Amino acid sequence: MNDKETKKWAQEMFEKLDSKLTVEALRLGHKIPYIPDEKTGLYEEDMAAADPAWWTNGFWAGIMWQMYHATEKKLYKETAEFSETCLDKALDIFTGLHHDVGFMWLHTAVADYRITHNERSKARGLHAAQLLAGRYNPRGQFIRSWNRDRSGWVIVDSMLNIPLLYWAKETLGDPRFGYVAEDHADKVMNHIVRADGSVNHIGVFDPTNGELLETPGGQGYASGSSWSRGQSWAIYGFVLSYVHTGKQKYLDTAKKVAHYFISEVSQTGWIPAVDFRAPKEPVMIDTSAGVCAACGFLEIAKHVEEYEKNLYMDAAMNILQAIEKNHAIWDEKKDGIIDDATGSYHYEKWTEVPIIYTDYYFVEAILRILDKDFLIW
Ligand code: GLY
């Protein structure tokens, strides 16, 4: 596909997205969506009420801010602002919050601040950044991911949370936030990314000295396997660390994981299995891993030599088109845009369903191709 054809396809997608997201935003009103109801195909549950601290509660606002940036439609802006104020409850409650404050506030308050420069949003974003920095373990040199007794647990998903710290560093002119983010990225790069470019989901470290103790399988098949969304968190997360620090080691790491991902996904029609190292049966896919990796590939393509660009651009386009062709829900009477995302290999409830973060990465990828996006990370 040449550049003109790629843009034509993306423009067609953008028009469909604008139409469907307008309908969804009007139908949803004041709710934060996650997964449509199995029976009605609509977003029935309101996550703002069900669980204000749930890690995905920012993605709907992220979609809305990206679409507002591209269209200037008031509906998108007002819908995003509503999610942002709902999340104040999570800041107040505090105890349910984990390292996912990055996902939650980059897409709400920080996106708002980047676009409108409003001071209340800046304060919310900085509040969330302080919470994330407060999870740093100076002996272990990592940010703890989860709560309870898991003081030494680091999950690769964290690579998409630390851009909140890069933003705080820039916004406050305070290098501490950068030191924390880079120490953490180094820990993940040196202990969670494997030599062959595959990635563990979890590293459990001794919290008193940072020594790696074990690598459970987490949301993937088993220890030693290769959870595809974890691979895409690493691809996109490391290239973002490169964007914010200029350090070549992070771009090299993103490329190494990208090459592994491409070698796997190209064997299954460009639709990722939930885990690249799970048994062949049952066949289980995760479209969210594909669209997130595609965003990472589109970002990597901006920072490599001309002769390398096509590898990443072609992989991104192959994935996006295969997913759209086989898994998009364009019926405006249903909620959710991309079907067949899977939350976790061993948790049947969220297997091959539309999940809000998949829609976010699909929207971002389409807007990226059209140069209508803004960097939310
Ligand atoms: N951050 C949790 C997940 O990717 O499902």
Image: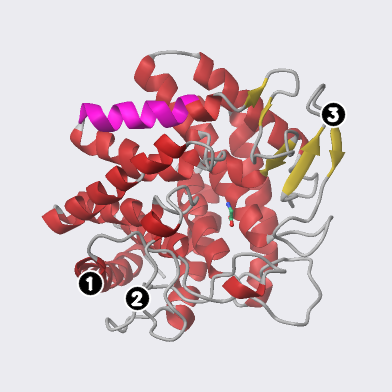
Give yes or no for contact between labels 2 and 1 (Cβ–Cβ under 8 Å).
yes
The span shown in magenta is 118-130
> Is-magenta flag for residue 122?
yes
Q: Can residue 13 be seen in this view?
A: yes
Instruction: Give the foreground label among 1 and 3.
Output: 1
In primary-sequence order, the first of circles 3 and 2 is 3
Q: Name the residue under label 1.
A: 27
Q: What element carries label 3?
A: loop
Q: Along the polypeptide, which appears first: circle 1 or circle 3?
A: 1
Picture coordinates of residue 37 (x, y %)? 43, 78
- Quarter of the figure that contains the N terminus: bottom left
On the picture, is 131 further left or further right than 281? Answer: left
**Percent x, y for residue 269?**
60, 77
- In the image, 7 versus 273, the foreground residue is 273
Q: What residue type is labelled 3?
A: Glu
CA gap, disc 1 and disc 3: 50 Å
Q: Residue at x 30, y 66 (%)?
A: 4
Q: Is residue 50 a member of the stretch shown in magenta?
A: no
Q: Does any portion of residue 73 appear in the rendered image?
A: no
Q: Viewer-nearest of labels 2 and 1? A: 1
Disc 3: CA contacts within 10 A as few (<14), some (14-19) or many (>=20): some
What amino acid does circle 1 point to? Arg
Question: Compared to 113, does 320 lie above or below?
Answer: below
Q: Quadrant of residue 140?
A: top right
Amino acid on which disc 2 is placed: Asp
Looking at the image, is mark 2 or mark 1 earlier in the sequence? 1
Prevailing SS of the magenta stretch:
helix
The residue that label 3 is drawn on is 211
Q: Mark 2, residues whose alpha carbon is within 10 Å: few (<14), some, or many (≥20)?
A: many
User: Mark 2 — residue?
Assistant: 335
Report the residue at 41% width, 36% height from top.
91
